[in-house]
Image (cartoon, helix red, strand yellow):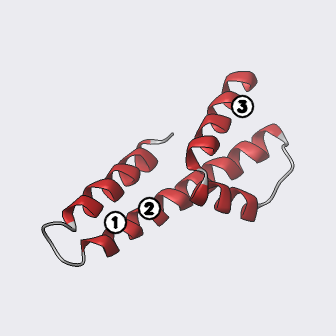
């Protein structure tokens, strides 16, 4: 994962926990989660282009949105095979 995706994933957790102290912090949490999803989608698209893997942006987006641990593992495995 890139530094930005790591940062936005932790900002989601931090702002979601801040909801206990500050009303409305959940909105920032979900904003950062969707930023994380967009970054993961972009990484997966670049990997698909580089390794000529079939797929489309919607598969990458919804996979990153709902199954991000599986997507991160898949990216790491594909990168280890390619190098």
Residue at image location 69% in from the left, 56% down from the top: 60
Residue at image location 85% in from the left, 42% down from the top: 52
Q: Could you tell me if the residues under marks 3 and 1 are in contact, i.e. CB atoms within 8 Å? A: no
Observer-nearest of 46 and 31: 31
Tell me if 54 is positioned left or right of 73 in this view.
Answer: right
For marks 2 and 1, give the CA distance: 6 Å
Q: Which secondary structure lies at badge 1?
A: helix
Point out which mark residue 29 bears.
1
Q: Which secondary structure lies at badge 2?
A: helix
Q: Which residue is mark 2?
A: 33
Q: Which residue is mark 3?
A: 78
For marks 3 and 2, give the CA distance: 24 Å
Tell me if 70 is positioned left or right of 9 in this view.
Answer: right
Residue at image location 63% in from the left, 42% down from the top: 70
> Badge 3, how many Cα within 10 Å: few under 14, some, many 20+?
some
Q: Quadrant of residue 53?
A: top right
Is 29 rendered above or below residue 47? below
**Nearer-N-terminus badge (3/2):** 2
Observer-nearest of 48 and 73: 73
> Badge 1, how many Cα within 10 Å: few under 14, some, many 20+?
many
Name the outermost residue toward the front.
20
Q: Quadrant of residue 37?
A: bottom right
**Nearer-N-terminus badge (3/1):** 1
Point out which mark residue 62 bears.
none
Mark in front: 3 vs 1? 1
Q: Position of residue 44 (x, y in %)?
A: 67, 48
Q: Quadrant of residue 6?
A: top left
Residue at image location 15% in from the left, 72% down from the top: 22
Tell me if 57 is positioned left or right of 24 in this view.
Answer: right
Q: Position of residue 43 (x, y in %)?
A: 61, 48
Q: Quadrant of the C terminus?
A: top right
């Amino acid at each position: 994962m890139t530094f930005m995706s790591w940062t936005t994933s932790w900002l989601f957790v931090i702002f979601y926990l801040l909801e206990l102290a500050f009303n409305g912090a959940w909105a920032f949490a979900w904003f950062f989660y969707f930023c994380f999803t967009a970054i993961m989608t972009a990484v997966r698209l670049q990997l698909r282009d580089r390794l000529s893997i079939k797929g489309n942006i919607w598969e990458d987006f919804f996979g990153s949105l709902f199954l991000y641990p599986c997507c991160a593992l898949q990216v790491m495995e594909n990168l280890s095979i390619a190098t």
